[in-house]
Image (spheres, rainbow, N blue to C red):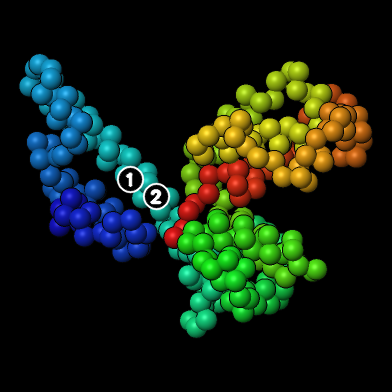
Amino acid sequence: MRAKKRCREIRIGGVLSEREISDLRRALEDAGSLLPVSAVDFGAGARILLGQIRIDPKVLENCQTRCVRYLIILVKNLLDILPEQSSRLMAVRYFTPREALRQEGRADVLLLPVGGLDVDVDQLEQEWERLPKVDWVSFFRGEIPKTSVAFWQGVVQYDRMAAEPKFETLTAVAFRALSNPLANADVERAFSFMNAIKTKPRNRMSAKLLEAVLRIRMRLSKQPGCCKGFQPWPEMISLFTSDMYSYDRVAQEEGVEEGGDEGWEEINICALEEENTQIYECE
């Protein structure tokens, strides 16, 4: 079975099963199963570029061969991490509004991707079973959001409006799963922002303020627009006081010595709030 043919059989946009991963790995290891370089489609952009330039056929063949080798190595590396990622992605789908609000055939609470959170399983189960019993259509004014992020943001807002939170544990698990980085590139990007933000003048800022700057930078990098069009809510404005620049007071509360970096190191780069990270969007 040729690797290219096997790729065509895989569901577009779906999560690869273990059998599909195994088939692809065997196809890549067998040189006879691969199509010749001349049969590889390098894309419309490559065809347009080749039509605009003159290049020696031997140089072109060498370049295409190296591209194919690179792609094979890339796919092999991806296949090595897919088994773990596949199970994680499959579990994240339980947080879609369609799955989470299902009345019958709902996923068992033990299937939810709790991750490294230390949660009360009994409490989590109670909240999971309580979730579809709420009139979410009325709460969302006629239409439940189709995306996971918008829905769970609404659940958090529902808890804030209630006299007593009813989904505190469940929302923590949901946002932890949705904001979990699925690639090292996500983590490296966060540290890149951190290095750009933590400058010498900002060493006097509190850890909370530094974290807030990081959240804003990551948010603006993922969504269109800029801070000029941002509308702060009243609670946020009430916090915009000189106290947020008081390093000594906040450092004392957090147990950080003056000039130290301990407070900054405690910032959880990988688990930033849902609206400020690259979230795996489940529909």
| Label at residue 80 | 2
Q: Work out whether 65 lies above or below 109.
A: above
Q: Residues within 10 Å of mark 1 (few under 14, many from 20)?
A: some
Number of marks in the image? Answer: 2
Q: Work out whether 40 lies above or below 134.
A: above
Q: Secondary structure at mark 2?
A: helix
Q: Secondary structure at mark 1?
A: helix
Question: Along the horizontal axis of the image, is 46 left or right of 152?
Answer: left
Extreme residue in the bottom direction: 104
Q: Amino acid at mark 2?
A: Asp
State which quarter of the image contains the N terminus. bottom left
| Label at residue 76 | 1
Q: Could you tell me which residue is drawn at 90 percent across and 40 percent down?
A: 253
Q: Position of residue 197 (x, y in %)?
A: 66, 26
Asked if residue 113 can be seen in this view, the reply is no
| Label at residue 88 | none
Depth check: 238 or 142 in front?
Answer: 142
Depth check: 200 or 3 in front?
Answer: 200
Alpha-carbon span between mark 1 and mark 2 = 6 Å
Q: Report if the CB atoms under discs 1 and 2 are less than 8 Å apart.
A: yes
State which quarter of the image contains the C terminus. bottom left
Q: Position of residue 3 (x, y in %)?
A: 19, 51
Q: Position of residue 9 (x, y in %)?
A: 21, 60
Q: Could you tell me which residue is drawn at 67 percent across and 73 percent down?
A: 127
Extreme residue in the left direction: 57
Depth check: 273 or 60 in front?
Answer: 273
Question: Along the horizontal axis of the image, is 99 left or right of 168?
Answer: left
Q: Work out whether 94 lies above or below 282.
A: below
Q: Could you tell me which residue is drawn at 13 percent across and 36 percent down?
A: 37
Q: Amino acid at mark 1?
A: Lys
